[in-house]
Amino acid sequence: MDQELDRNEIERLYNLKAKERMQIERQPMPEQEPDVRRANFSEVPFGYFPMAAIVEANRCIQCKKPTCVIGCPVGVNIPGFVRRIAEGDFEGAIHVIKETNMLPAICGRVCPQEQQCEEACVLAKKGQAVAIGRLERFAADWEREHGLADVPPIGADTGKSVGVVGSGPAGLTVAIDLRRAGHAVTIYEALHLPGGVLMYGIPEFRLPKAIVNAEVDVVQQMGVDIEYNTIIGQIETVDELLDRHDAVFLGTGAGLPWFMDLPGENLCGVYSANEYLTRCNLMRAYDFPNYDTPIAASERIAVVGGGNVAMDVARTAVRLGAEEVYLIYRRSEAEMPARLEEIHHAKQEGVILKLLHNPVRYIGDEQGRVCQVECVRMELGEPDASGRRRPVVVEGSEHTIDVDTVVVAIGNGPNPLVPRTTDNLEVDPKRGTVVTNLNTMRTSKRGVFAGGDIAVGAATVILAMGHGRQAARSINHFLATGVWDIDELPEAFRENGAG
């Protein structure tokens, strides 16, 4: 990423008027060619070179009322860090980001900026938003590649301790802010590696494991203990954690895969997206037999769903050598919830979109292995509760597609293990989520807080991080005052993790 900077050009750009800045075109990010990346698991985009980042940052007109910040769930000072990149002060940029976000290399890669900060960018009203996510990634990568990652200062020891269940984005964020406040923190992770969904759910070509490990390493340098292979709800209960901790945070994520209850779902070769991606990402099935977790070799694979997880599965299948990868989605491409970039990359890589299709059953061969998926065609009717047009079956449109593997990627529910084994913890009977006051992240059980997917259902990495920050504020208040039954935090505890 090193590149000699043209200081005269930096100064010229920095002195442009707002109207002139708005004429600068959004800078593309170089990436692997589709034919090359189909055969490897390396990250697809290479990231900005320094001068490209500076040019992109100078597209920002530094609004007096920066709506982009309102669109960020953790409230990053976006104009502040973008301005520093525009000046060529990359170290200053990452310091600004880390005032509120300690996982910027992750967020810069996987957060849906186009639906959050970039959607709120003033430039998006008349053209293309500033590439805020790409600039965040640039600053984080520059810091790491130059060996400048600092460990945040730790507050004076409070004598209090907090147990955090799960080392995903919510758990890591709450742990960081609690250590900043001076509390002892222990994370209990069910798997053998940290990161939660960042590690098992997101493929290497979107989020390299080295990036996750580097971010987690900083958390551990802060003095956060992580106990691996510790399944809370089986090895220990939340009540037992409360015996030795002053508070507990639940960040167990959405580990319960959903199925459609179709005939044939129990056939060999029918996977949930969770299992398929966990085998590939966490267990390195793509490098079998060097890693001893196999995965079925597929020639024709059908992926059911239209979100980011479905795209991750389909693009993984391409890299595992499938000749034909069908993505079956019951609406049109316009209604797909996946990020536009992921859809674009999937199509470039040869994924076949079977739009306005829906599976109705899976057909097996004599050995009990899936060999066909029967689908019906759909058409779009009136909008439903989500605002998207409701898919309606076209009568008489049944047909089959030959496959040897099916992966169902229609969503996940909250992990049910902790709620089932914890007394006095209220759970939404329909959604399976832990009932949580989203102002304070407090549950119905004194001393227990929750955030991320366990509180709201499957959502985004950055929303989980926002919950982690809010939970840290609330935990600080509880540990400082002992007060539990409140619906909103006092003003002094709302602005930062330390309270």
Image (spheres, helix red, strand yellow):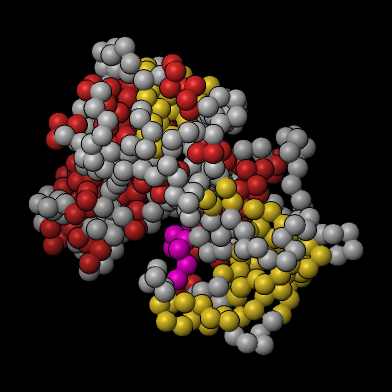
x 16%, y 47%: residue:
14
Residue range (magenta): 335-342
- Residue 149 lies in the magenta stretch: no
Left or right of 259, for residue 186: left
Q: Using the image, determine if residue 17 lies above or below residue 285.
A: below
Quarter of the image with the N terminus in it: top left
Q: Using the image, determine if residue 288 lies above or below residue 413.
A: above
x 65%, y 71%: residue:
359
Residue furthest toward the bottom?
A: 396
The image position of residue 432, as x and y in percent, is 49, 49
Left or right of 498, for residue 48: right
Residue furthest toward the right?
A: 366
- Residue 336 lies in the magenta stretch: yes
Quarter of the image with the C terminus in it: top left
Residue furthest toward the front?
A: 424
Residue 219 visible in this rendered orientation of the protein: no
Which residue is at the front of the view, 123 or 478? 478
Quadrant in which residue 173 is drawn: top left
x 51%, y 77%: residue:
391
The image position of residue 161, as x and y in percent, is 37, 18
x 52%, y 50%: residue:
413
Q: Using the image, determine if residue 265 lies above or below residue 153.
A: below
Count of numbered labels shown in the rendering: 0
Left or right of 103, for residue 122: left
Left or right of 298, for residue 312: left
Residue 368 visible in this rendered orientation of the protein: yes
The image position of residue 124, as x and y in percent, is 25, 63
Quadrant in which residue 410 is drawn: bottom right
